[in-house]
Structures are given as C-alpha cells and as structure tokens.
Image (cartoon, helix red, strand yellow):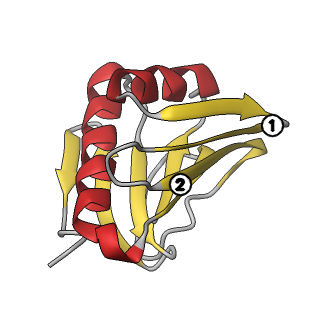
C-alpha cells in the first residue's frame, strides 16, 4: 500500500502517531522505518526533496505530496495489516491537518483525507 502525504508533514509528526500505536520505529539516513507490532506490517517513509504531484491514478487534488510511505503486509496477516493501517490513518487524520491518499500500487484508491475529513473508499481486505 502506498501513502502520499501533503507537503509540510515531518517525520516527527508521523513518529508521534506511530508511538501512540506502540509501533517500533526509527529515523535513520533520511527514512522513517519500522513495524506495527500487531500485524507485522513493515513501513518505510521518505520525504521528497521537492514537492511532487500526487501519483495515485484518478486522483485530482490541489495539493502536492511532500512525503511517501509504503506499507508491506505479510500475506498471512492481511486482515490485521488492514486494521493497523486503518488505525494509523485515522489517528494521523486526528493528530494532523495534512491531506493524504492511500492507494495500492498507485492504481486503486483506498483512502483519501481532504479538507472534508477522511474517507475510506474501499476495504483493503474483502
């Protein structure tokens, strides 16, 4: 799963949400990496050197992405993985005002957070 977050968010803001969830994480060499304890999802966040257009297909937004995140989900824990990712995004939308989109391989849109709030468009696991 690929997350694109609006310009301005920091690793510290992401780390704060991860800490609330009890996720293990570290900031090293320009990346924030770690795991959700419940599901074992491995995540990697990186900041862009210059703002980028949102890459998720079919998304028409008026903001630029300043950070991306990738979530790598263990096949045998897909339900738990989706619960952890949903919880993280819900907490992120409560703790910050930054807009974001979550997609699968930048093709299928699953979650959008815009000026109206967060919207879960489809389930990550059926």
- Residue 13 x, y percent position in the rendering: 51, 22
Quarter that holds the C terminus: bottom left
Number of other residues with Cα within 10 Å of mark 2, as a class: few under 14, some 14 to 19, many 20 or more: some
Q: Which residue is mark 1?
A: 30
Picture layout, residue 51 above or below residue 104: above
Query: Earlier along the polypeptide chain: callout 2 or callout 1?
Result: 1
Q: Residue at x 25, y 41 (%)?
A: 87
83 on left or right of 41:
left
Residue under label 2, please give it: 42
Occupied quadrant, residue 25:
top right
Percent of width and height locating residue 116: 20, 39
* Vertical position of residue 11 compared to residue 36: above or below: above
- 25 and 12: which is toward the camera: 25
Could you say which is closer to the camera, residue 80 or residue 62?
80
Q: Please provide percent x and percent y for residue 27.
A: 71, 30
| Residue count near mark 1 (Cα–Cα under 10 Å), binned few <14, some 14–19, many ≥20 | few
Instruction: Say the numbered circle drawn on residue 105.
Output: none
The residue under the point 62% across, 50% down is 44
């Amino acid at each position: 799963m690929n997350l694109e977050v609006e310009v301005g968010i920091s690793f510290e803001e992401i780390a704060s949400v991860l800490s609330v969830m009890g996720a293990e994480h570290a900031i090293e060499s320009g990346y924030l990496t770690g795991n959700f304890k419940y599901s074992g999802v491995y995540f990697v966040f990186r900041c862009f050197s210059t703002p980028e257009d949102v890459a998720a297909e079919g998304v028409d937004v008026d903001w630029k992405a300043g950070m991306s995140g990738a979530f790598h989900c263990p096949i045998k824990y897909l339900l738990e993985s989706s619960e952890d990712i949903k919880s993280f995004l819900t907490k992120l939308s409560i703790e910050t005002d930054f807009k974001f989109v979550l997609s699968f391989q930048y093709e299928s849109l699953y979650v959008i957070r815009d000026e109206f709030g967060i919207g879960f468009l489809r389930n990550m696991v059926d």
